Amino acid sequence: MGSRLLNEVRRAIQVRGYSYRTEQAYVGWIKRFIFFHGTRHPRQLRRVHVEAFLSYLATERKVSPSTQNQAFCALLFLYREVLGIDVGKLEEVVRSKKPRRLPVVLTIAEVDAVMDRLHGTAWTVVGVLYGSGLRVTEALRLRVKDLDFERGELVVREGKGKVDRMTMLPRKLFDALKNQLRRSRELFDKDCSHGGADVWLPDALARKYPHASAEWPWQWVFPATKRSVDPRTGALRRHHVSASMIRKAVRSASRGAGIHKPVTCHAFRHSFATHLLEAGYDIRTVQELLGHRDVSTTMIYTHVLNRGGKGVMSPLDGSR
């Protein structure tokens, strides 16, 4: 029963073009849900059982709100998309409390100090995070055709929420990115000579453009040094650089710079937004560059401007 159901879940996820990471996460939560209820088939379970599991995660496991929400999304997908059952509204779920935290923002000097300790691919990737406001996965999924040096722009394909957006391509990164593309081209030519120039494409694109995965414009800007086996298809292809490699490099560089803030890759995106607002750019412009659906999400950066709480100057600082 279990393996058959989980295979149905995997097929449904793949048909909808969800990522492999989402597939792993959803299947994992569905397994935990089934075992939590004594391996009973989900068809025998209803809303009260879903509520009990999600409440258990909050009260007993003390999971974060984002983790609980991921579990909720997995179960919602199971019932609606796979089993065709509407579990209704889940009013009785005990929600994990979401702490209101301000984003970690680096000063320009701190950004420079970290980047001075980065080299090669890690330096270029972090330059894109800070210079263009990308998430680390968005930067690593850039393809050759997404960079426009003539216009000084780059396109983020299927960012968060499956939405494309355009942002600036800093001129300070031109040389580094062109060198990166030369290295990528060398790997591509090497793969071509061995008959294996191939990268992953979303299913819909792969069907529409069956040969695109082996064409230069679709190759990764930041390819991995070695080819690996696709866990879904078993095909040997070249993936992009792993996010964990960049995260480790950032942690090491921030420690070396003596920065005591919790510096992550995402801190550079936060810094991009905050520094643009400090420079006087309109918040709607920053919202568009970040790809936020709602300006209220972007508004949080007004709380961390150097001018004090909520971006206003204290009357004491303006007094004689």
Image (cartoon, helix red, strand yellow):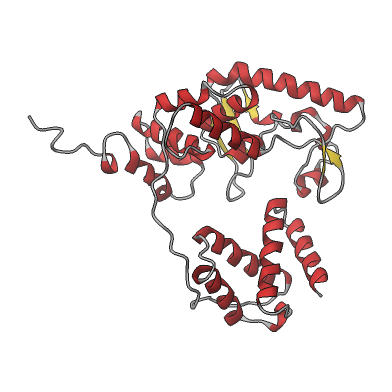
- Quadrant of residue 191 within the rendered picture: top right
Residue furthest out toward the left: 320
Quadrant where the C terminus is found in the figure: top left
- Quadrant of residue 155 within the rendered picture: top right
Q: Relative to residue 203, is residue 260 drawn left or right? A: left
Residue at point 75%, 33% (across, down): 218
| Residue 170 drawn at (x, y percent) | 53, 23
Residue at point 72%, 74% (across, down): 83
Residue furthest out toward the top: 175
262 and 155: which one is in front? 262
Compared to residue 193, the image places residue 13 above or below, namely below
| Residue 150 drawn at (x, y percent) | 60, 19
* Residue 8 seen in the figure: yes
Quadrant where the N terminus is found in the figure: bottom right
176 and 284: which one is in front? 176
Residue at point 67%, 55% (across, down): 22
| Residue 266 drawn at (x, y percent) | 51, 40
- Quadrant of residue 2 within the rendered picture: bottom right
Q: Relative to residue 161, is residue 240 drawn left or right? A: right
| Residue 203 drawn at (x, y percent) | 78, 49
Residue furthest out toward the bottom: 44
Compared to residue 190, the image places residue 196 above or below, namely below
Q: Relative to residue 18, is residue 123 drawn left or right? A: left
157 and 275: which one is in front? 275
Residue at point 53%, 75% (across, down): 90
Compared to residue 87, the image places residue 159 above or below, namely above
Total tally of numbered discs in the picture: 0
Q: Relative to residue 300, is residue 150 drawn left or right? A: right
* Residue 19 seen in the figure: no
